Amino acid sequence: MSAIERCRTAALGGHVEQCDNCGYQRIAYNSCRNRHCPKCQSLVRAQWLEDRQADLIPVEYFHVVFTLPEAIAAIAYQNKAVVYNIFRQPDLGYFNLIPV
């Protein structure tokens, strides 16, 4: 916790950045690089969210949970991408695969 509290403060040191055009200088303090630090991980978090947004298709979503029979579940566990893609087929739909 102490590393996160000291993140981007003089306690962790820093360096001076200078503009090549106008000569303006500013002090840039070092980060703690802790994986739990919201300051250090904000760019990683933003990139992760952007990547997840790219995975979404432009439709309304509903959260659906169901259980596969044990024989299928074992196969699905080893071939997640294939099984997930089957459920994402627009012509099949989620519930057309489950007999009623």
Image (spheres, grey):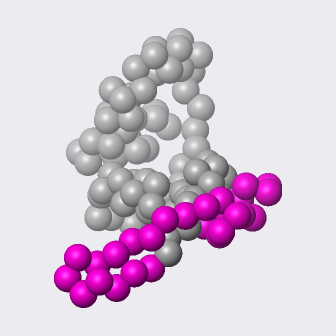
Where is residue 79? Give x, y as percent: 40, 20
Asked if the stretch drawn in magenta spans residue 34, the answer is no
Where is residue 44? Give x, y as percent: 46, 55
Q: Nearer the viewer, residue 74 or 27?
A: 27
Q: In which quarter of the image is the N terminus?
A: bottom right
Where is residue 91? Give x, y as percent: 23, 45
Where is residue 82? Give x, y as percent: 33, 26
Asked if the stretch drawn in magenta spans residue 24, the answer is yes
Magenta region, residue range: 1-26
Q: In this view, does 14 lie to the left or right of 1?
A: left
Q: Is residue 1 left or right of residue 9?
A: right
Which residue appears farthest toward the left when viewing the image? 21
Q: Which of 55 and 27 is in front in this view?
A: 27
Q: Is residue 12 left or right of residue 57?
A: right
Q: Which of 40 and 96 is in front in this view?
A: 40
Does the image show residue 56? no
Q: How many numbered discs, if any?
A: 0
- The residue located at (61%, 61%) in the rendering is 13
Which residue appears farthest toward the front when viewing the image? 23
- The residue located at (70%, 64%) in the rendering is 11
Q: Which of 72 and 38 is in front in this view?
A: 38
The correct choice, above or below, for 86 with respect to 45 in the image is above
- The residue located at (55%, 27%) in the rendering is 68
Which quadrant of the structure image shows residue 52? bottom left
The correct choice, above or below, for 8 with respect to 86 in the image is below
The correct choice, above or below, for 68 with respect to 57 in the image is above
- The residue located at (58%, 38%) in the rendering is 66
The correct choice, above or below, for 73 with respect to 67 in the image is above
Which quadrant of the structure image shows residue 43? bottom left
Does the image show residue 63? yes
